[in-house]
Image (tube, rainbow, N blue to C red):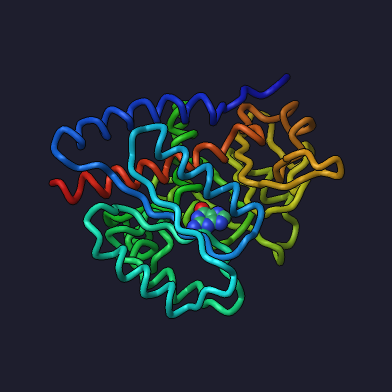
Amino acid sequence: MSAQLIDGNALSRQLRTELSQRVSALKVRGVTPGLAVILVGDDPASQVYVRNKVKACEDIGMHSVLERYAASYTEAALLQRIAALNQDPSIHGILVQLPLPPHIDAHKVIEAISPAKDVDGFHVASAGALMVGQPGFWPCTPHGCMKMLEHIGYDLRGKHATVIGRSNIVGKPMALMLLHKDATVTICHSRTANLKALTLQADVIVAAVGKRNVLTADMVKPGAVVIDVGMNRNEAGKLCGDVDFEGVKQVAGWITPVPGGVGPMTITMLLVNTVESAERVTG
Ligand code: GUN
C-alpha cells in the first residue's frame, strides 16, 4: 500500500488564487495589504526564505517591503524601525526573520511588534489568544498543517495526534490547534522515553524536530496521517524532511512530501494573516 500525497503546492495555489480575489476587493476599497519583512545579517537560508515571502506577496497583488540590515545593526535601531512600522498605515503585517544575530534579543524584538500586525503569530499576546481560543494571528507553519488536514476532510474529533517537537513556533501551537479540534494530543521531545510507543498509537503524526529520519515506517500505525515539517539536507545536499518518506509512505494513509508539502503552506498562511490584518483595519 502507498499513502496518498497531500500536495502543499497545489493547495497553496488554490488558496492564493482565493486570496488574490480578497486583495482585489480590498484594493477597490482603497487598501492594499502590505507586509514588511526585516532581515538582519546574511544567513543564507534566511535570505532565500525572505525572498520567497516577498515574491509570494507580489504574486497576489500585495504590497511588500524587504528591509535588509547588516549583522552589526543594533537592537535599539531595530526596535525603532519596528515602532515606525507599527505606526505605518500602509503596513498590515511585520515579520522579523529569525534567527537574529546573537547581540539582539529576539524575544524583545517580537514583543515590540504590535499584536495587530504580528502576522507570524509569535507575540505573547498571539500565543495567549491561541491558548484560550480567542481571535488572533496563528503561527503560519502549524496553521498550514491544519489547513492540509482540513483539505483532506480529516475529522480530528476523538483522534489521537502525536506531535514530535515542542518549539514555540511549531510544536506547542500545533498541539493547541489540534486540541481545539478535539483531538487527544501527545507532545514528544528530545527527553521523551519510548517515542515509538507514542507514535504507534497516533492517528495523526506531526514531525517538527529538524532532524532526518526521526520517524520511520516501524513507528507508524497503518493508515495514519503523517505531516512532515522538517527541512533538512541529506548527504547529497538534497532537501528532505524529518520523516523517512520512502519507508513511511508504505504504511501511512496520507503523507506530506518535502519539498512541496508544509513549506509552501507556511508562506500561504503568512499571506492569509496579512490579508486578514488589512481586512480587520478596513472593517
Ligand atoms: N525563521 C524560520 N521560520 C521562520 C518563520 O516562520 N518566521 C520568522 N520570522 N522567522 C523564521
Looking at the image, is 94 positioned above or below residue 261? below
The percent position of residue 202, horizontal first and vertical second, equals: 61, 43
Residue for point 73% across, 62% down: 193
Looking at the image, is 236 positioned above or below residue 112? above
> In this image, 245 relative to 51: left or right?
right
> In this image, 204 relative to 178: left or right?
right
- The residue lying toward the viewer, choosing from 207 and 277, is 277
Placement of the N terminus among the 4 image quadrants: top right
Q: Would you identify the image quadrant in which residue 19 lies?
A: top left
The percent position of residue 201, horizontal first and vertical second, equals: 65, 44
Residue for point 55% across, 62% down: 98
Q: Would you identify the image quadrant in which residue 28 lies?
A: top left
Counting the numbered discs, the total is 0
Residue 170 shows up from this direction: no
Residue at the extreme top: 1
> In this image, 122 relative to 232: left or right?
left
Looking at the image, is 4 positioned above or below residue 155? above
Residue for point 62% across, 37% down: 226
- The residue lying toward the viewer, choosing from 207 and 238, is 238
Residue 194 shows up from this direction: yes
Residue for point 66% across, 61% down: 189
The percent position of residue 2, horizontal first and vertical second, equals: 71, 21
- The residue lying toward the viewer, choosing from 161 and 101, is 101
Looking at the image, is 107 positioned above or below residue 165? below
The percent position of residue 27, horizontal first and vertical second, equals: 20, 35
